[in-house]
Amino acid sequence: MAHLMLLSSDLLVSLSPETMATQCRRSRTSFTEEQLKILVQAFSQNPYPGYTAKQRLAVEINAEESRIQIWFQNRRARHGFLKKPKKNVDPSKDHASPIEKIQDGTDRRCRTSFTSSQLQTLKNAFTENPYPGIDSREQLAEEIGVPESRVQIWFQNRRARLRVQRKRGLEEALYQRQNQGQDL
DNA sequence: ATTCTAACCTAATCACACC
DNA sequence: GGTGTGATTAGGTTAGAAT
């Protein structure tokens, strides 16, 4: 068990994401002008749509919600916009904007709760390959009955937490070594 | 070749349940 | 109060398609 985790950790550092993760991406979606028009319009109104807003958009332009999310992420990164992503500055004060009550920052996707068997499947897959391509992710998603986008997020989070865990371990080891050296 | 941008990544953080 | 973990963000990289 422990050595399997080490194996995956070694993969994480030895094989760069570029070589591993990008060998099987999802095929690039090309939005039609009509779709783009709607997306751009929505972005100009609100660069930070909540989950329900993104879902609405997804239905409206007949695309997956995950693609909408990626599109907004990319758009925010490249085009300037006015809003601030900061936490709600005015908690108790309620400004005169009753219209947008849906997307007031707390409109997130409902947290998906994985069953232990689903987690086991994901963990097993992670030890085999921490950077699954689109095919593997779709297969996993199908197998455990969860959207592929959730599988992708799960792998991202797991890699991130493995990295910080591993970094902490290194720091602790270094700290101990320094202490020993000074005491000697 | 260059340009544009979807897909993907990391790092940090939020949210929220649980203890 | 901390821990665990799914969801979101900023910001950077990779790669496919159009120019």
Image (tube, coloured by chain):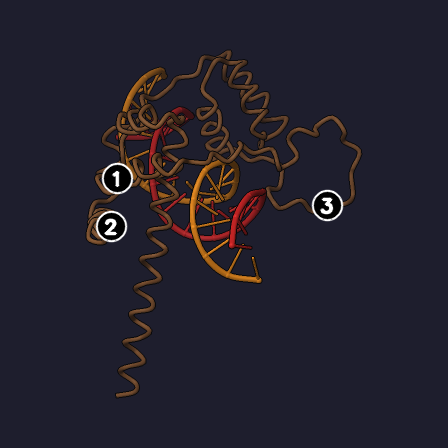
Chain colours: A brown, B red, C orange
Q: Which mark is residue A81?
A: none
Cα separation between marks 3 and 1: 43 Å
**Residue labelled with disc 2:** A5
Q: How many residues crowd mark 3 within 10 Å: few (<14), some (14–19), many (20+)?
A: few
**Up-down relation of residue A89 to residue A28 (above or below):** below
**Left or right of A15 on screen, residue A81:** right
Is tag 3's residue or tag 2's residue first in the polypeptide sequence?
A: 2
Where disc 1 sits, the SS reads: helix
Judged from the image, the secondary structure of the residue bearing numbered disc 2 is: helix
Q: Position of residue A136 (x, y in %)?
A: 26, 28
In the picture, measured across the screen, residue A46 lies left or right of residue A67, that is: right
Name the amino acid, label 2.
Answer: Met
Tell me which chain the residue with mark 2 is part of.
Answer: A
In front: A9, or A63? A9
What is the quadrant of the C terminus of chain A in the image? bottom left
> Which mark identifies residue A91?
3
Tag 1: residue type? Answer: Asn
Tally of numbered tags? 3
